[in-house]
Amino acid sequence: MSVGRKMMVVMKGLIFSYAVTGVLLALLAFLVFKFQLGESITDIAIVAIYVVVTFIGAFITGKKVKEQKFLWGFLLGVLYILIISVVAIIIGQTFHVASTANLSTAALCIGGGLLGGMLS
């Protein structure tokens, strides 16, 4: 499989990951509204959603790519968190690259992608 085709598989994995993210974040928003969940629980749930969807997206990507799966899972995790970060900056959210929370979230997403790729 050519590199271009592998990148298309990664892009499809990203699209799938973002679709699942949207559904899970909508569900979380409903749960926060219905049960008045606290901010700390919500923050943890958001990061957990990010990690789970990067794992799933990388797992699916690895199944289709079939070689160097960890590398393509890593790339998916990096692109996932990079796109989220860029969108956060564009919509005007306060974003500090070197903050512990952002670095931890990035590391967890990249790790989720790596693990998903390796286990596929």
Image: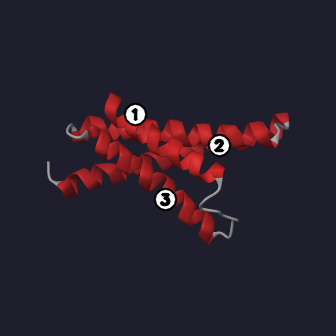
Q: Quadrant of the C terminus?
A: top left
Residue denoted by label 1: 115
Q: Is residue 19 visible?
A: no
Number of residues whose C-alpha sits closer than 10 Å to that of mark 2, classed few (under 14), some (14–19) or many (20 or more): some
Q: Amino acid at mark 2?
A: Ile
The picture places residue 59, in percent across and down from the top left corner, at 36, 35
Q: Quadrant of residue 50?
A: top right
Mark 3 vs 2: CB contact within 8 A: no
Residue denoted by label 2: 46
- Closer to the camera in the image, 97 or 47: 97
The picture places residue 75, in percent across and down from the top left corner, at 36, 50
**Quick check: 52 left or right of 61?**
right
Number of residues whose C-alpha sits closer than 10 Å to that of mark 1, classed few (under 14), some (14–19) or many (20 or more): many
Q: Is residue 119 visible?
A: yes
Residue denoted by label 3: 82
Q: Secondary structure at mark 2?
A: helix
Q: CA distance from mark 3 to mark 2?
A: 16 Å
Residue at the (53%, 49%) spot, across then down: 106
* N-term-proximal mark, 3 vs 2: 2
> In this rendering, which labeled residue sits more in front, label 3 or label 2?
3
Q: Is residue 3 above or below residue 115?
A: below
Q: Quadrant of residue 8?
A: bottom left
